[in-house]
Amino acid sequence: MNKSFGKIHHFMGIELNQQTWSLLENENRNEEDNSRMIAFANASLYHWKKSPEFKPINEQRGEWMISHVYAILNNGEWSLTHAKKCWTLTRQLNLSGFDLAYAHEALARSYAALGDSEKMNYNFLKAKSVGSGVANKKDQELFLSDLHKGPWFECMKTAGK
């Protein structure tokens, strides 16, 4: 691969990830914003995979992001597809702590969007347990804060936070 193309892919992976977060944080998104958010999350992962600085953990985190976007948009089927990819990579890479907690969180949100409160609760409690044990206190606080943010749809009415 041409070295300058690699740098462009790296830049685009980062930029599209930041654009995805910007849209996620926008409480006044419209349908066009939602479509852009899906495209940006997918494109970010694509570009990360082409970056010369790509590491397998980037793919795991990219799959988490795509799953998260779909969960936020209440599209449980697509969210679960990507959460399962995130989970598979988490297991293959033997990830723990922060990344393992987020993999459980992805599954929990996916099941919440699908209305499966039993599987949501199981993964939520796993995420909370793993996240509470994250060694870096800032990472732990970030994760637990993210975990307790919505949407959890109707599932949290039947499960304890």
Image (tube, rainbow, N blue to C red):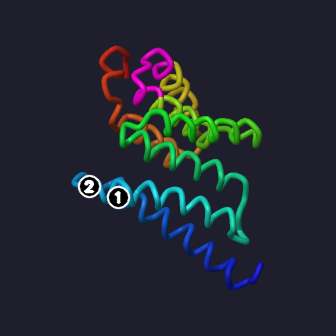
Is 161 colored magenta in this rendering?
A: no
Is residue 8 placed above or below 154 in the rendered structure?
below
Is 117 covered by the magenta stretch?
A: yes
Residue 96: percent from left, percent from top = 67, 38
What secondary structure characterizes most of the magenta part? helix
Q: Which mark is residue 15?
A: none
Pinpoint residue 91: horizontal percent, then vertical percent.
73, 35
SS at circle 1? helix
CB-based contact (under 8 Å), mark 1 and mark 2: yes
Q: Quadrant of the C terminus?
A: top left
> Residue beneath label 1, please?
23
- Looking at the rendered structure, the kind of residue marked 2 is Arg
- The residue lying at 67 percent from left, 81 percent from top is 5
Instruction: Tell me the crowding category of disc 2: few under 14, some 14 to 19, or many 20 or more residues within 10 angstroms, Cα based.
Output: few
Residue at image location 45% in from the left, 64% down from the top:
18
- Find residue 71 and report its image quarter: top left
- The foreground one among 48 and 36 is 36
Mark 1, Cα crowd under 10 Å, few <14 / some 14-19 / many 20+, is: some
Label whose residue precedes the other's in the sequence (1 or 2): 1
Q: Position of residue 84 (x, y in %)?
A: 61, 35
The residue at 44%/37% (across/down) is: 144
Image quarter in which the N terminus is found: bottom right
Q: Is residue 158 above or below residue 154?
A: above
Element under disc 2: loop
- Judge left or right: residue 32 versus residue 56: left
Left/right placement of residue 59 relative to residue 42 reads: right
On the rendered structure, is 56 left or right of 37? right
> What residue sits right under mark 2 in the picture?
29
Q: Quadrant of residue 64?
A: top right
Point out the stretch of residues depicted in magenta.
111-121
